Image (cartoon, grey):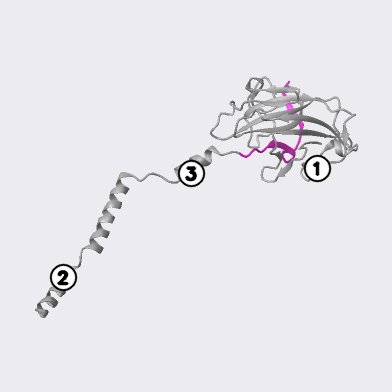
């Protein structure tokens, strides 16, 4: 019922995400407009905008990004797993971690509109689908401009789409969500801190014992090939006497 795509994006089969390497792009949220599991226009849907960081970086120090006309920093984020509730601990009704959560995220609410419809879409097959260029009635859509030029190196954004429901116990839980294969992320290329570390570590300095062993081996090598054998010296003396 729910999908996320990126105009001119591509599909990463390993991450199972629609991805982009553009710093400025259009994120598209899709909700099915017909059949039994159709999107409800009166329902609040949420975009989770989560921070992905290199393993050796503090995810809180990501810089900033723009979503729509607004700029967001760490002061606008919460730490945990969506949905954003008063109790930030792990709940049964949370969205799956899929290797991303817990992390800092922003939960952005919106509603679909009957005036914004597009043709049938499957972002796994057509990740760069442009809803404005494909008129139809199969899916509602909302498009959001994203500007990540304020993100620091080795930071990325991950997007999830979901709705919530309040249980009889008063707990807010995820009601419906885009499948993990229909989420979206940025995929910026940058020098990896881990790669630099591993390259340095792959050429360790020799220990004291190793240096001693190398020196001893060199001495043996020198004695073997520089000093003439005793037997050879005796033969040379005999040859000299026979000449005399």
Q: Are marks 1 and 3 in contact (CB under 8 Å)?
A: no
Residue nearest the observer in this picture, 145 or 137: 145
In the rendered structure, which disc, 1 or 2, sits on the residue that comes first in sequence? 1
In the rendered structure, which disc, 1 or 3, sits on the residue that comes first in sequence? 1
In the rendered structure, which disc, 2 or 3, sits on the residue that comes first in sequence? 3
Q: Name the residue that disc number 1 marks.
A: 122
Image quarter where the C terminus lies is bottom left
Q: Position of residue 122 (x, y in %)?
A: 80, 42
Q: Is residue 216 left or right of residue 234?
A: right
**Residue 199 numbered tag:** 3
Label 1 element class:
loop
Residue 215 belongs to magenta span: no
Image quarter where the N terminus lies is top right
Residue sitting at x 76%, y 44%: 124
Q: Which residues are magenta?
A: 170-189
Residue nearest the observer in this picture, 77 or 20: 20
Q: Name the residue that disc number 2 marks.
A: 233
Asked whether residue 56 is in view, the answer is yes
- Foreground disc of the pair 1, 2: 2
């Amino acid at each position: 019922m729910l999908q996320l795509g990126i105009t001119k994006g591509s599909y990463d089969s390993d991450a199972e995400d629609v991805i982009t390497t553009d710093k400025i792009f259009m994120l598209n949220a899709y909700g099915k407009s017909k059949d039994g599991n159709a999107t409800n226009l009166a329902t609040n849907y949420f975009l989770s905008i989560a921070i992905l960081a290199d393993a050796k970086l503090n995810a809180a120090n990501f810089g900033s990004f723009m979503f729509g006309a607004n700029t967001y920093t760490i002061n606008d984020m919460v730490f945990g797993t969506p949905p954003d509730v008063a109790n930030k601990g792990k709940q049964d009704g949370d969205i799956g971690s899929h290797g991303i959560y817990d992390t800092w995220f922003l939960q952005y609410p919106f509603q679909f509109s009957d005036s914004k419809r597009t043709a049938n879409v499957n972002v796994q097959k057509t990740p760069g689908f442009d809803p404005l260029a494909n008129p139809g009635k199969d899916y509602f859509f909302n498009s959001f401009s994203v500007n990540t030029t304020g993100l620091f190196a080795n930071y990325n954004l991950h997007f999830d789409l979901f709705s919530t429901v309040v249980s009889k116990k008063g707990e807010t839980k995820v009601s419906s969500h885009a499948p993990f294969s229909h989420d979206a992320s940025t995929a910026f290329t940058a020098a990896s801190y881990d790669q630099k570390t591993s390259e340095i570590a792959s050429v360790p300095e020799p220990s004291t014992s190793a240096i001693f062993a190398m020196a001893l081996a060199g001495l043996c090598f020198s004695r073997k090939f520089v000093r003439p054998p005793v037997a050879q010296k005796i033969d040379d003396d005999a040859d000299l006497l026979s000449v005399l």
